[in-house]
């Protein structure tokens, strides 16, 4: 029997199918296709999840457990959630899927001279999870070394479909559990010197002529999850000129520890906190890439980026994520109130008067 | 917290050698002792953008005419509701300005009058501007007709026989009066359209700042700015002549351009010489009425009086053409960039906003060329004729024994020149020697010492206590006197050591060795690939803009000449740094960031080279030569 592919590399020449890849992987494939500097990796498709669930024979269990569950009975929801997640993480992966995953992992590793750590992230299809597009809500496992670690975390991502929060969300929003699925991204880990986010508008006033970025030392997770106060820089989107910069405290950074082969959170010394963590040239490059993403997807974007310390200047900016900006994109610049409308002598007079009024 | 202030002019004495300097200038131009309270209540900024060096007594005519005519148009012709003119004083030889507001209670009443008057000009812009062209050219023609010859021993016999009834002394006095009044007239024409150009620009600017909060000033300038303007014609003519010389095989004849006669004679002797000389002659009128200065100083050199200047520039251009460089301004790229910027901002607007945006931009673009082009007609052409005539008069009186050097008349106030002419015609009339030759040499010598002494000191950037916010539109736009700028001057800038902040006047980033120059006489020192650092630049420095990579000035805003020219040449510029030219030394490696308005002295310049595309091709050569210098050091 033929089935949809279990694996799709980001740079395979296949159109991104959202159902198969989930939001995150579809976006990474689209970004890669658009020529953006996305770290290499592959998606384990929803077809793989479906095969796993089918093979494990737990479909019926899942539906039975979720049936008639009261979203307000937190204790019962927690119990069901724990049981479902345990069922998923304890089942063996079917041999065919396991072999394909292993081959993909090795194919990814073969692109590098020595083994590279990877990140494993869940990639949900749109309505299955709360705030699917919201940064930090999806499961992310960083700095994984070795295929065993990777396959384990793939199952952890699958299991995250059944967190208490996800279950309650679906119950309250009448989202059926039938057809629920999950893709997973396996991606080369970035060795971030600096990382952060950028949004292709000014979220404080809806001004679409700006790009606002946040940046801090180390991996971007501390910025995304709000654990550090990042540098905040506003760039004019058309001119790519900095119009405002605010130095954040950036007291900690998440960096790899070579000895323990894991990530550690270190305190940033004062002299590195007191200045911007990115140069003007880097700011321009980040803004340019955010602008390019917006142009490609034809709507305001919210990107995650990193500067990889292992890559040379000029090639070290990587795009980790780009999603449609969902909070403000309904407000165009057109919504900024304007007192200097019209043109000709009347508006000229008004402008002169308003200058004088500022005294 | 006490407010930080600049010194009071009353507490600032120049060196002893300059004692008595106030007598050199008319009473109304200096801070009078008994007006201390009135004068100290005002904030004065130094206009070193237009008057970077000490003005000699006669040269005050430049700011008296320019700044009073600017004021006249605001306050009497157009009745611009919130702004009157700008007061000016001379202090220790330098020119200071203070904008005059309109009392709150009078502003509203001016609105309908302004709308009627200015509205008429905006509605009839093209017709009125065509009329302006005729008026200014007519005025220049009249100025050109003036001459200042020594009086003859006897009245020409024809004048006696024809019963003319007056002597040439009458014409001499009349010509001086005409010289002054025609120039005054030209300065009124100067402002007939200029202030309107600025207010239309300001309207578009205000709108952009409102719909795109924080939009860089440069973005607005780039959307409005034209690319094909008369102000750039003189330089374009030189480029054409350089290319023609190469085509005609005349390139080798530009070896010694310091000697224009010999150069032109050698060209004439060549078989193809006459074709080139015809083009050369054609270009001169009117485009060589162009100064390397700014039109405000008697010593400003004009191309047509110093043919070695245009010939030298042509020589430089020939070398560039022969080495395969494209010497033309990147006009197509500039237009494409302007269109891109305009389109990208347009796409972000709602339909109503877009209508306002396009309407305002359309008007700003219509009026903008005047903002540039008038400079050729007045500062270059009119003032070129004015100074030539004034020098002729000075030389004539020098030959009559009034002063030891040909140009010493400029140490006299213009009213004193008139007195001197009366002295001269009186002596001529009575048949006894004039008094001046016994009076002026010593007085001129005394004044020369004072002017030289004043010139050894730099002016304060401003005087007295600044207002909390600068709102006067012309002060902001033309002079770039912003609240931040004042902070900079007061030493409140938070820029680190070795870094200067100014206005991001023209985008791009470039690095290179600094070349600090303080006057146009040093222009020939500028080498390929250098970064020009100067207190202020003039638009006529165009020909050296083919060599340099970036420009840094002490003074000037978004609409200053350095800013405009750099945008026109697609080269980074940071203007209004305050003190960069005094603190940077020639040869220091600089990084000029025209996107962020910063200039940094780079100690270890092998790192972090991010260059504007325009400058990138020059990098290798400059780096190579810089390394060469290092290894020799």
Image: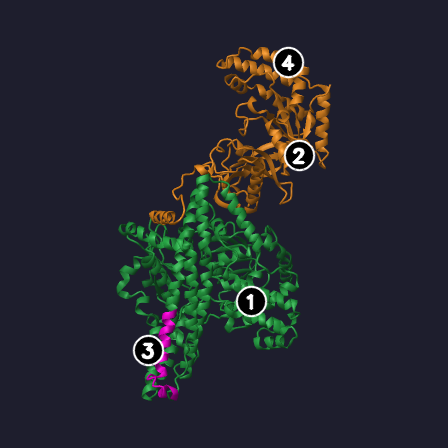
Chain colours: A orange, B green
Q: CA distance from mark 3 to mark 4?
A: 113 Å
Looking at the image, how many numbered discs can be counted on the residues? 4
Q: Quadrant of residue A314?
A: top right
Check whether the beta carbons of the residues at disc 3 and disc 4 lie within 8 A of each other.
Answer: no
- Chain letter of disc 1 in the image: B
Q: Nearer the viewer, residue B368 or A306?
A: B368
Residue B164 position (above or below residue B595):
below
Q: CA distance from mark 4 to mark 2?
A: 33 Å
Instruction: State yes or no: discs 2 and 3 in contact (Cβ < 8 Å).
Output: no
* Pointer 4 residue: A58
The quarter of the rendered structure image containing the C terminus of chain B is bottom right
Dividing the picture into quarters, in which one does residue B417 lie? bottom left
- Across and down, in percent, residue B530 comes to 57, 60
Residue A122 drawn above or below residue B326: above
Q: Secondary structure at mark 3?
A: helix
Q: Which residues are magenta?
A: B156-182
- State whether discs 1 and 3 lie on one chain: yes
Image disc number at residue A40: 2
């Amino acid at each position: 029997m033929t089935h949809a592919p279990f694996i799709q590399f980001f740079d395979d020449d296949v159109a991104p199918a959202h159902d198969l890849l989930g939001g995150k992987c579809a976006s990474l494939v689209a970004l890669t296709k658009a020529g953006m500097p996305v770290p290499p990796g592959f998606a384990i498709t929803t077809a793989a999840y479906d095969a796993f669930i089918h093979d494990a024979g737990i479909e019926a269990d899942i539906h039975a457990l979720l049936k008639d569950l009261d979203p307000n009975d937190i204790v019962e929801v927690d119990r069901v959630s724990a049981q479902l997640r345990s069922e998923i993480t304890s089942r063996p992966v079917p041999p065919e899927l396991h072999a394909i995953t292993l081959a993909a992992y090795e194919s990814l590793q073969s692109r590098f001279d020595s083994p590279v750590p990877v990140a494993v992230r869940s990639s949900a299809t749109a309505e299955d999870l709360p705030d699917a597009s919201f940064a930090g809500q999806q499961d992310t496992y960083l700095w994984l070394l070795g295929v065993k670690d990777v396959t384990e975390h793939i199952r952890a991502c699958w299991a995250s479909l059944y967190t208490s929060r996800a279950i309650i969300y679906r119950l309250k929003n009448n989202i059926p559990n039938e057809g629920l699925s999950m893709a997973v991204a396996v991606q080369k880990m970035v060795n971030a010197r600096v990382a952060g986010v950028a949004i292709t508008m000014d979220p404080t006033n809806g001004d679409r002529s700006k790009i606002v970025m946040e940046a801090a030392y180390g991996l971007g997770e501390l910025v995304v999850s709000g654990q550090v106060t990042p540098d905040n820089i506003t760039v004019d989107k058309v001119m790519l000129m900095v119009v405002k910069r605010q130095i954040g405290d950036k007291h900690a950074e998440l960096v790899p520890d070579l000895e323990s082969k894991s990530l550690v959170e270190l305190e940033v010394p004062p002299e590195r906190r007191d200045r911007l963590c990115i140069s003007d040239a880097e700011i321009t490059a980040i803004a340019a890439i955010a602008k390019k993403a917006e142009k490609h997807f034809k709507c305001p974007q919210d990107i995650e980026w990193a500067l990889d310390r292992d890559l040379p200047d000029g090639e070290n900016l990587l795009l980790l994520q780009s999603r449609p900006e969902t909070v403000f994109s309904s407000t165009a610049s057109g919504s900024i109130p304007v007192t200097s409308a019209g043109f000709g002598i009347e508006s000229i007079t008004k402008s002169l008067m308003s200058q004088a009024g500022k005294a | 917290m006490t407010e930080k202030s600049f010194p009071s002019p009353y507490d600032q004495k120049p060196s002893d050698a300059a004692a008595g300097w106030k007598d050199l200038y008319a009473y109304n131009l200096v801070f009078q002792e008994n007006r201390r309270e009135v004068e100290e209540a005002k904030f004065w900024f130094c206009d070193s953008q237009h008057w970077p060096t000490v003005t000699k007594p006669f040269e005050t005519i430049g700011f008296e005419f320019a700044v009073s005519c600017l004021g006249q148009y605001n306050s009497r012709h157009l009745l611009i509701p919130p702004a009157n003119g700008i007061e000016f004083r001379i202090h220790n030889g330098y020119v200071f300005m203070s904008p005059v507001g309109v009392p709150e209670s009078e502003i509203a009443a001016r609105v309908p009058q302004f709308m009627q008057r200015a509205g008429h000009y905006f509605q009839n812009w093209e017709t009125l501007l065509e009329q302006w062209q005729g008026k200014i050219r007519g005025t220049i023609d009249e100025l050109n007709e003036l001459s200042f010859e020594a009086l003859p021993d006897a009245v020409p016999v024809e004048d006696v026989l024809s019963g003319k009834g007056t002597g040439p002394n009458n014409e001499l006095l009349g010509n001086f009066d005409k010289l002054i009044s025609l120039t005054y007239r030209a300065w009124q024409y100067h402002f007939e359209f200029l202030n309107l150009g600025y207010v239309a620009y300001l309207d578009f600017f205000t709108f952009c700042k409102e719909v795109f909060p924080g939009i860089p000033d440069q973005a607005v300038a780039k959307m409005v700015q034209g690319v094909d303007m008369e102000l750039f014609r003189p330089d374009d003519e030189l480029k054409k002549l350089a290319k023609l010389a190469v085509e005609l095989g005349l390139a080798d004849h530009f070896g010694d351009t310091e000697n224009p006669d010999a150069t032109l004679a050698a060209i004439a002797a060549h078989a193809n010489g006459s074709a080139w000389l015809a083009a050369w002659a054609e270009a001169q009128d009117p485009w060589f009425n162009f100064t390397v200065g700014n039109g405000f100083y008697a010593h400003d050199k004009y191309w047509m009086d110093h043919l070695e200047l245009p010939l030298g520039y042509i020589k430089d251009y020939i070398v560039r053409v022969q080495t395969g460089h494209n010497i033309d301004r990147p006009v197509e790229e500039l237009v494409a960039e302007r269109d891109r910027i305009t389109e990208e901002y347009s796409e972000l607007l709602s339909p109503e906003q877009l209508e306002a945006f396009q309407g305002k931009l359309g008007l700003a673009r219509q009026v903008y060329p005047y903002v540039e082009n008038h400079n050729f007609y007045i500062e270059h052409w009119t003032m070129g004729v004015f100074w030539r005539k004034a020098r002729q008069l000075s030389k004539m009186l020098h030959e009559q024994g009034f002063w030891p050097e040909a140009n010493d008349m400029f140490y006299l106030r213009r009213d004193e020149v008139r007195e001197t002419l009366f002295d001269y015609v009186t002596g001529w009339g009575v048949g006894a020697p004039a008094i001046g030759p016994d009076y002026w040499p010593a007085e001129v010598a005394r004044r020369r010492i004072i002017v030289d002494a004043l010139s050894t000191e730099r002016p304060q950037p401003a005087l007295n206590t600044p207002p909390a916010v600068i709102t006067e539109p012309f002060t902001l736009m033309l002079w770039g006197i912003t609240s931040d700028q004042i902070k900079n001057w007061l030493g409140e800038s938070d820029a680190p050591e070795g870094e200067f902040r100014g206005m991001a006047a023209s985008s791009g980033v470039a690095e290179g060795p600094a070349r600090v120059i303080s006057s146009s006489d040093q222009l020939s020192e500028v080498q390929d690939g250098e970064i020009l650092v100067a207190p202020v630049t003039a638009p006529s420095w165009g020909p050296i803009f083919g060599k340099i990579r970036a420009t840094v000035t002490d003074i000037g805003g978004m609409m200053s000449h350095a800013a405009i020219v750099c945008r026109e040449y697609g080269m980074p510029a940071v203007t209004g740094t305050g003190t960069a030219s005094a603190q940077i030394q020639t040869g220091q490696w600089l990084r000029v960031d025209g996107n962020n308005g910063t200039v940094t002295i780079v100690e270890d310049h092998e790192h972090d080279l991010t260059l504007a595309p325009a400058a990138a091709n020059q990098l290798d050569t400059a780096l190579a030569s810089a390394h060469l210098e290092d290894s020799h050091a």
